[in-house]
Amino acid sequence: MKEPALGARLFFNLPYFDADIDFVKIGGDFTFNMARSIGPRAHFRARWRQGQRLRAPDLESLAFFLVERYCFFAEVGGQVEMTRVYHHPWILDEALIVSHDSSLITSAGLRDPAETPLAHFSSGVNVQVWAPQKV
């Protein structure tokens, strides 16, 4: 198991699985291919172009809900744990999807959504993570 997935599973009890990942950036075009090498079989493939810079999402918007997470939860032996996370707000750009194919949702036993995927792009943020605490 690769170190990031192993660390997420061991230290934060997150359901991360080892995967073979290929990421390519050429100018403003991106390609991401992932196939799990253990756990429930799943893949994710996407190509996108970086679009226009978006303004900061409104506090009540779906974009804010999806990207501005400052804690996460995991179940450990019947007990819920919360881990606090700090980061500056994400600077989002449009992600103009060229192609995508994924079995991640169905591998979790859920139906694929019928709608076109909502996509944003960010170059990233630095993150600080605290130790999990029982809730």
Image: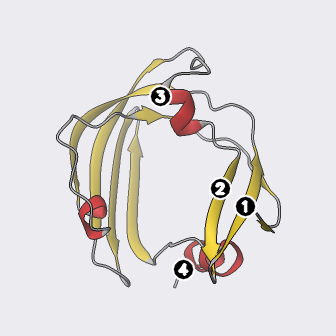
* Mark 1 to mark 3 CA distance (whole Å): 22 Å
Where, by quadrant of the figure, is residue 41 drawn? bottom left
Label 3 vs label 4, nearer the camera: 3
- The residue sitting at 82% across, 60% down in the picture is 130
Work out whether residue 6 or residue 33 is closer to the camera in this orientation and state it: 6
Residue type at numbered disc 2: Phe
92 lies above or below 76: above
Element under label 3? Answer: helix
Lower sequence index among marks 1 and 3 = 3
Residue 4 position within the rendered picture, expressed as x and y whole percent measured from the top left: 60, 72
| Residue placed under numbered mark 2 in the picture | 72
Work out whether residue 20 or residue 88 is closer to the camera in this orientation and state it: 88
Label 1 vs label 4, nearer the camera: 1
Q: Are marks 1 and 2 in contact (CB under 8 Å)?
A: yes
30 lies above or below 3: above
* Mark 2 to mark 3 CA distance (whole Å): 17 Å
* Mark 2 to mark 4 CA distance (whole Å): 22 Å
Determine which of the numbered discs, if any, sits on residue 62 in the image.
3
- Residues packed near mark 2 inside 10 Å, few (<14), some (14 to 19) or many (20 plus): few
Q: Quadrant of the C terminus?
A: bottom right
Q: Are marks 2 and 3 in contact (CB under 8 Å)?
A: no
| Residue placed under numbered mark 4 in the picture | 2
